[in-house]
Image (tube, rainbow, N blue to C red):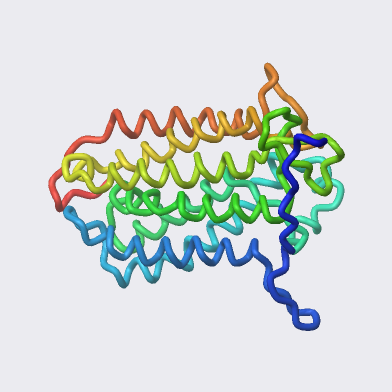
């Protein structure tokens, strides 16, 4: 206990006026979407052009719906199946929390496919630009998890361990910050380097594959420090649900990278 750092008890609610409250978690979503949108407007115009800036503006709504619907459905299916089978109407209670990144990723992929087919765009080129900005949202989201004092780490004796308000008396890894660094900051730098190399940018799907594989590796590493979800615990071979769901992402990412080939600018895929 004496070696633990004090948890910086930041109020999850930034401003509250009567029943109206602005929470850090909501601001994290907004910051990720707004900054990612502005950056993507620049990235789509890099050669070979993936879309117009106006089309990026239109896609923001699609992306938000994909994140919310996919993230919620993924949480219901992967993390709380039994509960929602007994009370399926509670799946609509978004204000009670419960989102899955893997489900949100599936929702955004579906949105990309539908949007690109509707507008005659290359799915892989457009997907490259999208995945180049996604780590921004992950970074802000993990910081919000830390502020909320949720998704804490496993018990630890490292000098920077913290006692989280609702996690018992044991000092724990601040795993939210580890994940913010790996899934957010480091992964963002990696995909930005890749998307800005003309030879790699000319290979549709390479950046998206880099993101998928990179996120999968970062998530698997981060889960070794994060406390498993209490309703699931450790699963097959001692792995967590987050680790098991990340394995297909790594395989899909590697496959995209291997299959990525330079294509004529007019080609779509």
Give the percent coordinates (x, y) of residue 134. Answer: 45, 52
Q: Is residue 45 left or right of residue 179?
A: left
Front residue of 84/150: it is: 150
Counting every numbered tag in the picture gives: 0
Specify the farthest residue to the top. 237
User: Taking 225 as reference, is 9 left or right?
Assistant: right
The residue that appears at 55% across and 45% down in the rendered structure is 180
Left or right position of 164 against 236: right
Quarter of image, res 116: bottom left
Q: Quadrant of the N terminus?
A: top right
| Residue 215: % across, % down | 48, 38
Q: Nearer the viewer, residue 144 or 75?
A: 144
- Which residue is drawn at the image coordinates 72% and 68% (left, top)? 13
Which x, y percent locates residue 93?
76, 61
Q: Going 70% across and 75% down the picture, which residue do you hit?
A: 15
Check the image and name the residue furthest to the front: 2
Give the residue at the far bottom of this rendering.
18
Q: Residue at x 68, y 55 (%)?
A: 147
Spot occupied by residue 174 in the image (x, y as percentages of width and height): 67, 40
Residue 42's quadrant in the figure? bottom left
User: Where 227 sits versus 267, above or below?
Assistant: above
């Amino acid at each position: 206990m004496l070696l633990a750092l004090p948890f910086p008890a930041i109020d999850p609610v930034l401003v509250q006026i009567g029943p109206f409250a602005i929470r850090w978690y909501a601001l994290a979503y907004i910051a990720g979407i707004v900054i990612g949108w502005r950056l993507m407007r620049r990235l789509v115009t890099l050669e070979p052009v993936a879309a117009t800036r106006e089309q990026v503006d239109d896609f923001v709504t699609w992306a938000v719906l994909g994140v919310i619907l996919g993230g919620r459905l993924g949480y219901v299916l992967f993390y709380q199946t039994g509960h929602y089978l007994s009370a399926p109407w509670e799946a609509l209670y978004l204000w009670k929390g419960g989102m899955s990144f893997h489900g949100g990723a599936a929702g955004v992929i579906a949105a990309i496919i539908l949007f690109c087919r509707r507008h005659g765009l290359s799915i892989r080129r457009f997907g490259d630009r999208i995945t180049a900005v996604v780590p921004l949202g992950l970074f802000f989201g993990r910081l919000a998890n830390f502020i909320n004092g949720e998704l804490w780490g496993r018990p630890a004796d490292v000098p920077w361990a913290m006692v989280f308000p609702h996690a018992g008396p044991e000092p724990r890894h601040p795993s939210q910050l580890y994940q913010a660094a790996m899934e957010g900051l480091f992964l963002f730098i990696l995909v930005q380097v890749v998307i800005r190399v003309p030879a790699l940018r000319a290979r549709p799907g390479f950046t998206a594959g880099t993101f998928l594989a990179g996120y999968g590796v970062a998530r698997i590493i981060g889960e070794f420090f994060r406390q498993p979800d209490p309703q699931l615990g450790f699963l097959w071979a001692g792995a967590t649900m987050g680790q098991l769901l990340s394995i297909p992402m790594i395989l899909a990412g590697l496959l995209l990278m291997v299959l990525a080939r330079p294509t004529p600018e007019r080609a779509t895929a």
